[in-house]
């Protein structure tokens, strides 16, 4: 595994100035702006932020899964040097599932109720590799075993409704990883599950990533999950990346007031200090985005100068934050 942030290898994924807008009756509605980040091969990165900050649309943009009639993407999505932002729909289909896969919060919506789970996993493989149905079934059984499903030969012939929520999410992971993609985007994969199952699925994703070398973008509002699973954390606020840092550093010393606020509202990690606060106010909506720092109306560190638009600034190697005060502010984290 490369060390977080400073990788000697060329990046697997390099997102450059990615902006997304939706066409509406009243014109283009900007959703994300100039999103920049890189993912090294095998790296596990948490993408965090409150609801509505643009995490899901960023994940969907990478796989070009947004509605083509309304979504407009600008910028570059360089995956192993190929720009996915401009790839033809046909070539994009060859990347999706094969090179980059995605799993979602609600596995039931991604599974087809009328086919067995074995058929669906097998199909995910046969789209990209021309093997017989029998071999596809063997691979599906092996994939179910890999994700810890007991009696995979029998489970293979069951329908999604016969499985528990946790088992269904395991099936989705099996389907996502059967072609050995280089990158898995997991969008809140445990949010719909109960707490003990959440921990099992999180562990499974981390161990599969470690074993297979698949890089992981773990989209979540749960910073505890990021602490346990990832080596780097990217914080999004109101459609922009506001902080990008190695997990260990950001947990102890966040550099952006928003990240600090998120960490302080995290029960598990803040408990020891006895401080548990939530950030007052709410994320501005895309059609009422303020000028200058987008976090300004909620920031307790705001001063004259914050009404200027904020670029990402490098604080130290491998650490950036979108706050001109970041170098001088000493902000509380989750672990002191
Ligand atoms: N298809 C769409 N059309 C218009 N706006 C959308 C669409 N999908 C998402 N949005 C808007 O984009 C913003 C970011 O949404 P999302 O990526 O789902 O946030 P998150 O995953 O961080 O909760 C939200 O304001 C949401 O309302
Ligand atoms: S730029 Fe100003 S308002 Fe924005 S996060 Fe930094 S201190 Fe707060
Ligand atoms: Mg989301």
Image (spheres, grey):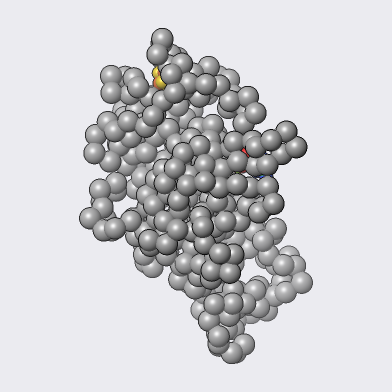
Viewer-side residue, 66 vs 163:
66
Residue 104, image x and y in percent?
60, 54
Residue 31, image x and y in percent?
58, 37
Q: Is residue 127 visible?
A: yes
Viewer-side residue, 104 vs 98:
98
Residue located at (28% from left, 41% from top): 318
Residue 291, image x and y in percent?
52, 21
Q: Quadrant of residue 311?
A: top left
Q: Is residue 12 left or right of residue 167?
A: left
Residue 218, image x and y in percent?
47, 50
Quadrant (top left/top right/bottom left/bottom right) for the N terminus: bottom left
Quadrant (top left/top right/bottom left/bottom right) for the C terminus: top left
Residue located at (44% from left, 23% from top): 309
Q: Is residue 218 above or below residue 143?
A: above
Number of numbered labels in the structure image = 0
Q: Residue furthest top?
A: 304
Q: Is residue 307 above or below residue 256?
A: above
Q: Is residue 147 visible?
A: no
Residue located at (65% from left, 28% from top): 287
Q: Is residue 104 above or below residue 99?
A: above
Residue located at (32% from left, 30% from top): 313
């Amino acid at each position: 595994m490369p060390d977080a942030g400073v990788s000697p290898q060329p990046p697997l994924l390099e997102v450059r100035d990615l902006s997304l807008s939706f066409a509406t009756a009243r014109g283009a509605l900007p959703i994300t702006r100039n999103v920049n980040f890189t993912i090294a091969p095998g790296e596990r990165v948490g993408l965090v932020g409150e609801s509505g900050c643009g995490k899901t649309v960023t994940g969907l943009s990478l796989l070009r899964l947004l509605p083509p009639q309304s979504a407009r993407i600008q910028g570059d999505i360089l995956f192993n040097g190929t720009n996915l932002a401009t790839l033809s729909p046909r070539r994009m289909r060859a990347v999706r599932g094969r090179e980059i896969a995605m799993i979602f919060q609600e596995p039931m919506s991604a599974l087809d109720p009328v086919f067995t789970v074995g058929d669906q996993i097998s199909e995910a493989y046969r789209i990209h590799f021309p093997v017989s149905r029998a071999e596809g079934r063997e691979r599906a059984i092996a994939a179910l075993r890999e994700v810890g499903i007991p009696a995979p030969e029998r489970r293979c012939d069951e329908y999604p409704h016969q499985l528990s929520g946790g088992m269904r999410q395991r099936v989705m992971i099996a389907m996502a990883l059967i072609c050995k993609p280089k990158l898995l985007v997991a969008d809140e994969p445990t949010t719909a599950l109960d707490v003990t199952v959440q921990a099992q699925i999180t562990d499974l994703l981390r161990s599969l990533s470690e074993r297979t070398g698949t890089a992981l973008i773990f989209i979540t509002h749960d910073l505890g999950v990021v602490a346990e699973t990832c080596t780097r954390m990217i914080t999004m606020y109101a459609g922009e990346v506001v902080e990008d840092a190695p997990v260990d550093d950001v947990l102890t010393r966040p550099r952006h007031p928003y990240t600090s606020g998120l960490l302080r509202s995290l029960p598990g990690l803040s408990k020891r200090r006895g401080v548990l606060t939530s950030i007052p106010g709410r994320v501005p909506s895309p059609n009422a985005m303020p000028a200058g720092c987008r976090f300004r109306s909620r920031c307790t560190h705001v001063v004259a100068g914050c009404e200027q638009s904020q670029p990402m600034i490098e604080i130290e190697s491998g650490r950036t934050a979108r706050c001109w005060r970041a170098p001088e502010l000493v902000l509380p984290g989750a672990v002191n």
